[in-house]
Amino acid sequence: MRHVTLKADLHLHTSEGEAFIAYDARSLIDRAAQAGFQVLSITNHNVVTFDRDLAAYARDQGILLIRGVEATIEGKHVLLYNIDVPPERIRSFADLRRLKGPDWLVVAAHPFFPGTYCLGRRLLKEIDLFDAIEFSHFYTKHINFNRPAIRLAKETGLPLLGTSDSHLVRQFGTTWSLIEAESTVTSVLAAIRKGQGQVVSQPLTLRQMAAVVIELVIGWQRDRARRWLSRGCGSLGLEGNAIDTAGVVVGNVQRSIVSDEEIDRPPPEVISLEPARREVLNLIGPPIQKHDANYFVSGRNGAVPGPMVRDEETAPVLRRKLVARVKGQAQRG
């Protein structure tokens, strides 16, 4: 087989992993085939959505499907491909270091976005484990948490992998990679390690970014309300990050049971807009601090190196606009 240029998106989520998502794996494959994609990986959170039948279905559509998962390792999101062990066995970076095989691909998922589950500076400590760094679709001309990832890639020589991290139809096809490889798992992953590819992307507009945030927040709130109602006065039983899009914190649920106090509350959708407002604010962060000609945006993990935005007024303006959009959407709904 000869090397060809393959259109690939290796960070995708489906309803098999998160119930609020509007499409399942086969529907996503159908859509990807129509859009000219030749390589995909479905990377649901801590769940491998892959089997022979699904791979054969993709192959019939002209698509190479690679086994993948977005694993939570010591509370941080890491993209793993072609693994031959269950993801639940990889709970720590020590586990990953011990189990990682030569045919695996390990990618830092949206490492410098403002979320507790983003790698941040932990990536520097564990850099020897990683084969590539993700370049996420979720950015604008003025807000781009991919910038420190780009700098780190240049400094370390690690390649960038462009992905959409799709949870919504509107996210799919916004960012992808073109990979020079044969259409086999071994060849594609080897090409990524060698940097034989390029990222294809363009910034979102503020309207597009706001639409993604609003749809994710509403989807998560509705899904959480359905779970609350379906269980009545029982436990909610949610664990991990209910929604993640390129590091945006849209419902970080880290408990396995609802307290007695919460059981007596009405469903989340009718409580208030405050949770959604806080989560949108978390995306943009508090006021920007200028330091040594670089900007720093504070997130839950502390300061993340910039430059992230072009002036000190941008973040407050975007905060107001995004919060206003969330409120307006909820009132109309």
Image: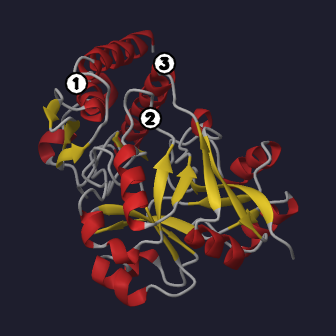
Q: Amino acid at mark 2?
A: Tyr
Image check: 206 left or right of 274?
right
Between discs 1 and 3, the one toward the N terminus: 3
Q: Nearer the viewer, mark 2 or mark 1?
A: 2
Judged from this view, the residue extending furthest toward the front is 293
The residue beneath circle 2 is 139
Q: Which mark is residue 207?
A: 3
Q: N-terminal of the two: label 2 or label 1?
A: 2
Percent across and percent down for residue 95 are: 33, 84
Give the quadrant of the N terminus: bottom right
The residue under label 1 is 274
Residue at 27 percent of width and 56 percent of height:
120
Q: Quadrant of the C terminus?
A: top left
Between marks 1 and 3, how big is the CA–CA gap? 21 Å
Q: Quadrant of residue 93?
A: bottom left
Mark 2 and mark 1 residues within 8 Å of each other at the beta carbon: no
Label 2 environment density (alpha carbons within 10 Å; few <14, some 14–19, many ≥20): many
Tell me the residue at 35%/19% (across/down).
322
**Visible in this render: residue 290?**
yes
**Is 83 positioned to the left or the right of 274 in the image?**
right
Element carrying mark 3: helix
Within 10 Å of the Cα at label 1, are there few (<14), some (14-19), or many (20+) other Cα atoms? few
Using the image, determine if residue 97 lies above or below residue 313. Answer: below
User: Could you tell me which residue is drawn at 48 percent across and 18 percent down?
Assistant: 207
Is residue 12 visible to us here? no
Give the quarter of the image for residue 100: bottom left
Horizontal and vertical percent for residue 35?
78, 42
Task: Name the element at disc 2.
Answer: loop
Q: Amino acid at mark 1?
A: Glu
